[in-house]
Image: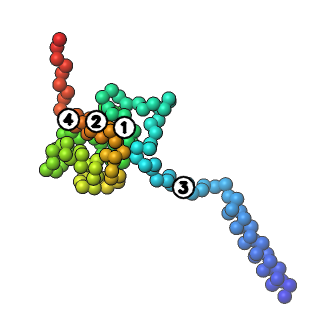
Amino acid sequence: MPSRTIVTLLALVVGAAFVLSACFNPGPTVVSQPGPLPPLGMITPITGDGATAAPEGVPASFVTTCGICHTVADAGTTGTIGPELSNIGTVAATRTSLSAEEYIRQSIEDPAAFIAPDYTPLMTAGLHDVLGDDYDAVVAYLLTLTDEPAEPAAAQ
């Protein structure tokens, strides 16, 4: 009988050793996934002095809101979640029966109305409210993004 008790105690000690060694294992751990993105418009641009860095002619709110998810080379944005917008002024008029401006406005106000090919509906509705007073300026800027060469400056 004493041998059975010793075997049982030995098994418990070995089991406890395995459990404790697993708790203090310095090996690879599970890395938690990042949490949800902050509400759009609440994202602070990454600059040294806290000022919004936007190239001339590009609304700052485009860089700090739209540019988080969309790439536009001229604006210096490199988002990869949504489609590239570098030629949206041209492409917008070909996606639906709407004009380019109507399509861009609809895409900002109701992003699920039309989903760009090869993308999923991730864009948040109501971004026109986030853009606030800059909404019309952002739409006007997006309309200038075409695949047509820029008009040369007039000679003086």
From mark 3 to mark 4, how far is it between C-alphas? 42 Å
The amino acid on which the numbered mark 3 sits, given as a three-letter code, is: Ser
The x, y position of residue 120, in whole percent, is: 31, 55
Q: Quadrant of residue 85?
A: top left
Circles 3, 1 touching at the beta carbon (< 8 Å): no
The residue at the far left in this view is 97
Q: Quadrant of residue 59?
A: top left
Per the image, the residue denoted by label 2 is 137
- Under circle 3, the secondary element is loop
Q: Which mark is residue 147?
A: 4
Give neighbour class at mark 4: few <14, some 14-19, many 20+ (Cα, 10 Å).
Answer: few
Circles 1, 2 touching at the beta carbon (< 8 Å): yes
Residue at the image position 81 percent from the left and 84 percent from the top: 4
Among the two numbered marks 3 and 1 on one chain, the one whose residue lies closer to the N terminus: 3
Residue 155 appears left or right of 58: left
Per the image, the residue denoted by label 3 is 32
The residue at the far bottom in this view is 1
Nearer to us: label 2 or label 3 = 2
The x, y position of residue 84, in whole percent, is: 29, 42
The amino acid on which the numbered mark 4 sits, given as a three-letter code, is: Asp
The amino acid on which the numbered mark 2 sits, given as a three-letter code, is: Ala
- Under circle 4, the secondary element is loop
Q: Quadrant of residue 9?
A: bottom right
Which of these two is toward me, 126 or 30?
Answer: 126
Residue at the image position 27 percent from the left and 53 percent from the top: 110
The x, y position of residue 90, in whole percent, is: 18, 39
Give neighbour class at mark 3: few <14, some 14-19, many 20+ (Cα, 10 Å).
Answer: few
From mark 2 to mark 3, how far is it between C-alphas? 39 Å
